[in-house]
């Protein structure tokens, strides 16, 4: 499997430094940290107590300020960070590296921008070697993917929503603790959302798992 290590957007260094490699080893090939990112040492253990809470708060505020995550201060954020650090697949880490890439209808690369299914297709192909169909509804119906109940979701699963009066009209990648990463809409950027938000809660229509993703 050919694992993609060089990301095209400066957000890659942020995620590797703060979320993915929080307490793990960072890869120098990913480039310098994002200039606005709160600092974190990739070679140090994850902080605990007041220091850990302060650092998590800084991460939350930074992501929220950039429009890459919902409002800061949610109680499950430490668990999300732990899952991204310890349990997420290479594919999820690759997806998180594209936070902040602009939405572009029909977009298939970070240079162009992504739409929702272009984003999932690109991440799956370049991290797992699995080429998904181009459209969200086609991805949902791909027989190689396993249907997954919501309560069984794991990082790396595809999550689908009805946002355009079609059962599978939107898709993202689950990252843990009810959060998913996606390319939402025109004028927005690749970001993390909470599936418990009323908008997404009402529109969730299913999930799929690649047999090689977990």
Image: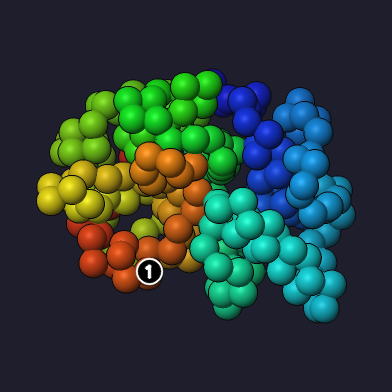
Q: Nearer the viewer, residue 214 or 77?
A: 77
Classify residue 11 as left or right of residue 130. Answer: right
Q: Quadrant of residue 209?
A: top left
At a point 32% along the width and 51% down the height, the residue shown is: 159
Classify residue 45 as left or right of residue 209. Answer: right
Above or below 82: residue 172: above
Q: Nearer the viewer, residue 96 or 209?
A: 96
Q: Position of residue 107 (x, y in %)?
A: 38, 25
Q: Position of residue 86 (x, y in %)?
A: 62, 55
Above or below 48: residue 205: above
Q: Which secondary structure, mark 1?
A: loop
At a point 63% along the width and 31% down the height, the residue shown is: 9
At a point 81% along the width and 33% down the height, the residue shown is: 32
Q: Quadrant of residue 116?
A: top left
Q: Nearer the viewer, residue 170 or 29?
A: 170
Above or below 185: residue 30: above
| Residue 87 seen in the current view | no
């Amino acid at each position: 499997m050919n694992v993609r290590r060089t990301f095209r957007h400066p957000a890659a260094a942020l995620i590797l430094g703060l979320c993915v490699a929080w307490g793990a080893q960072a890869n120098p090939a990913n480039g310098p940290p994002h200039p606005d990112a709160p600092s974190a040492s990739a070679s140090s253990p994850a902080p605990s107590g007041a220091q850990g809470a302060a650092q998590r708060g800084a991460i939350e505020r930074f992501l929220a300020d950039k429009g890459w995550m919902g409002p800061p201060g949610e109680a499950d954020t430490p668990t999300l960070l732990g899952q991204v650090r310890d349990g997420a697949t290479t594919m999820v880490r690759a997806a998180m590296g594209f936070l902040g890439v602009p939405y572009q209808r029909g977009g298939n690369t970070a240079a162009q921008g992504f739409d929702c299914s272009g984003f999932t297709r690109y991440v799956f192909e370049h991290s797992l070697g699995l080429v998904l169909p181009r459209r969200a509804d086609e991805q949902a119906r791909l027989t190689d993917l396993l249907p997954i109940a919501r309560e069984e979701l794991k990082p790396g699963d595809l999550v689908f929503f009805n946002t355009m009066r079609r059962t599978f009209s939107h898709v993202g990648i689950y990252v843990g603790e009810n959060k998913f990463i996606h390319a939402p809409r025109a004028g927005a950027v690749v970001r993390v959302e909470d599936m418990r938000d009323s908008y997404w809660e009402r529109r969730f229509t299913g999930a799929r798992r690649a047999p090689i993703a977990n």
